[in-house]
Amino acid sequence: MRKISGAARTLARRYAEALGQLAQAADQLDQVEKDLQAVQNLVDEVPAFAGMLNNPRLNSRIKNQMLEESLDGQVSRLVIGFLKLLVVKRREEILPAIVSEFEKIADQARGVLRAEVISAHALSAEQTVALQTRLEKMVGKPVKLVLQVDPGLIGGLKIRMNDVVIDGSIDRRLKLLHKHMTADANKRQEQEGIGAQG
């Protein structure tokens, strides 16, 4: 997913919240989440569908007709109606952010805490289960892991839950070590300077 601005993220959050309210009122939260993920997979995996949806030269009537033909019977009417609204409002480009925000809203409604876990390499199934169990014991509620791989990370993990970041990466430890060594070196230089003056 390409990066979007803070304003677009805020707008995506508003759309996701509105859809979340409709989904909860219709008792379709799980279904709508599944349907949004299916639509996002379609956008990611079928270039022709993504091209149609993101083509600024196609008018909304044609796009909505194509959405209807492509998705009828595949996803709920609520999701089709929502996508049509996005097309009319020309907000198709923020669909990935809306899906991401909706997943957060759905997890929150279920009482599940999302933990974004960044590691240098993919975690094994055993490591994933152990981490999830440990985090659930730590916070006292169900945790949903969202795993990401960052090859630039030098070992260890970074975990973000809500606005709390747990940085257990080797990269962070090296930065802290460098900071302490620099501070110690500066302190020694100051002391040597004072000793030379005395």
Image (tube, grey):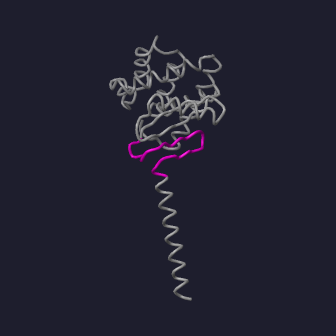
Query: Considering depth in this image, is 93 or 152 the residue closer to the camera?
Result: 152
Query: Considering depth in this image, is 133 or 47 the residue closer to the camera?
Result: 133
Q: Position of residue 84 (x, y in %)?
A: 49, 23
Question: What segment is highlighted magenta in the picture?
Answer: 150-172
- How many tags in the picture? 0
Residue found at x 36% / y 25%: 45
Instruction: Verify whether residue 9 appears in magenta.
Output: no
The C terminus is located in which quarter? bottom right
Residue lying furthest top in this view? 73
Query: In this rendering, does residue 93 appear at all?
Result: yes
Q: Position of residue 82 (x, y in %)?
A: 53, 23
Query: Considering depth in this image, is 47 or 107 the residue closer to the camera?
Result: 107
Q: Quadrant of residue 47?
A: top left
Residue found at x 56% / y 39%: 10
Query: In this rendering, does residue 90 appear at all?
Result: no
Instruction: Verify whether residue 168 appears in magenta.
Output: yes
Residue found at x 55% / y 35%: 115
178 lies above or below 74: below
Q: Position of residue 24 (x, y in %)?
A: 63, 21
Q: Position of residue 143 (x, y in %)?
A: 59, 30
The N terminus is located in which quarter? top left
Q: Quadrant of residue 144?
A: top right
Horizontal side, residue 138 vs residue 49: left or right: right
Residue found at x 62% / y 22%: 22
